[in-house]
Amino acid sequence: DRFSITIPQSLQITFVHIPPMTLPSTQRFTLIMESIHSIKLAYHALCQFTPHVYIDTTGCAFTFVVAKLLANCSVIAYVHYPTISTDMLNLVWERRPTYNNKTSISRNKLYTFIKLVYYVLFAIAYGIVGSLSDIILVNSTWTYNHISYLWRYHKIFNSKKKSKIHVVYPPCDISTSDVQKDEHNNNNRDNNIVSIGQFRPEKDHAKQIQSFAKLLSKYNGTDCLPPGIKLVLIGSCRNESDYNRVKQLRTLAYDTLHLSSSQVEFIINQPYPVLQKYMTTSLIGLHTMWNEHFGISIVEMMSNGLITIGHDSGGPKSDIITIPTSQHQRTGYLAGTEEEYVEAIYDIYQLQVDERKKLRQAAKVSCERFSDDVFMHEFKFYLSGVLSKIGGIKVSKN
């Protein structure tokens, strides 16, 4: 019901239940520990039911050892985000502290060296097991570039020496954006800035709040900003850690930066209609995650008429948002620093009605590349190729 998916009764589903004590609980060496436990889970699952085709969409590449070598399945991998990437290696090498590279490690040369060796060895192992796939699908150009490098051993396992890595954009629901048809509603939107995303550390909500505070500090009290602008952060909390993060963000906004609740609002764990309401009545969409693998929330914001600012990296930069060139119209804005976000927001507020209309229309057309129908067509194409090799099975066009 949550995703509006109807499951046919003819589809056989086997549920896999494992004891909680078999799941990793350590906060150290989580990459290798989670990979080992994913192998255990795959073995447990494939003992209950062994399919002809094993499709992984969760990023558990180490399960391919069980599926390919032990169960002799054809393996299709749809990679949303590499478990480890060259960016992560560079981050450790440059000793930059972040949510997955603690300051206690980045400041210590010995700890940094040990972690770098650990990452390199894991990356080699990850590349070998990932290369066992028969078909590799990735969700963006950014992911393609990383997987092409990390899973380069597939050229050894592939007798035909042909590339088996293909970009298939994830399905995005762009059919609900009826507001795009009503330009009157678009011209009468609230001056809200909306952020959509789970309250995880990598989403960098703090940058959104700090950029908003700098915007008000620089332009408030002048004729440059419209009255009543508000930053609305919409997202979900998975656990106590996420709730504590929201508490810290509230402290940053209300106590440290002295913003009011009428200027910054948090909306947590609300149903989709609430999210849809803000997307169809607000003016600006905001995204600040560095190296987002794709950015479905950006597509949703653009398709619902929000003039969107995405982070100048990853999927938003390589696949979704285009800036004006001789061949392309602007479909949104890209920014990296707080100052760049401030200037992008300011620029949007200065756009005339016809300029906003033109930008929204270009964004809407661009989002058609990411529709459910396009995804279904491409996914079935690659799936049918694998099925035809193992027994002439055909995939329905419907």
Image: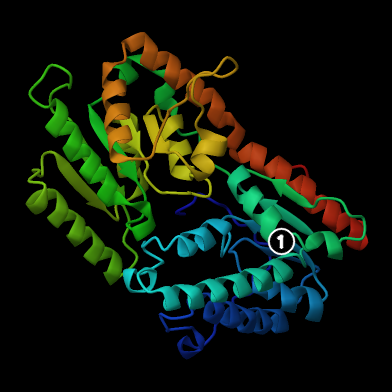
Dot 1 alpha-carbon crowd within 10 angstroms: few under 14, some 14 to 19, many 20 or more = many
94 up-or-down from 37: above or below: above
210 up-or-down from 179: above or below: below
Q: Quadrant of residue 69?
A: bottom right
Determine the residue positioned at 41% across, 37% down: 310
Please state if 73 lies on the left or on the right of 268 as rendered: right
Please state if 365 lies on the left or on the right of 63 as rendered: left
Outermost residue toward the front in this view: 109
How are the residues colored? rainbow
Could you tell me which quadrant the C terminus lies in? top right
> What x and y, as percent, mark residue 312?
45, 38
Determine the residue positioned at 47% across, 54% down: 1
Q: Does residue 140 show up? A: no
Which amino acid type is marked by label 1?
Trp
Q: Secondary structure at mark 1?
A: loop
Determine the residue positioned at 73% across, 79% down: 66
Q: Quadrant of residue 97?
A: bottom left
Q: Nearer the viewer, residue 165 or 210?
A: 210
Q: Does residue 215 show up? A: yes
Figure label count: 1
Q: Nearer the viewer, residue 155 or 90?
A: 90
> What x and y, as percent, mark residue 290?
43, 49
> What x and y, as percent, mark residue 320?
53, 35
166 up-or-down from 88: above or below: above
155 up-or-down from 37: above or below: above
> What x and y, as percent, mark residue 29?
48, 80
Report the residue marked by disc 1: 151
Determine the residue positioned at 62% across, 75% down: 121
Q: Nearer the viewer, residue 280 or 149?
A: 149
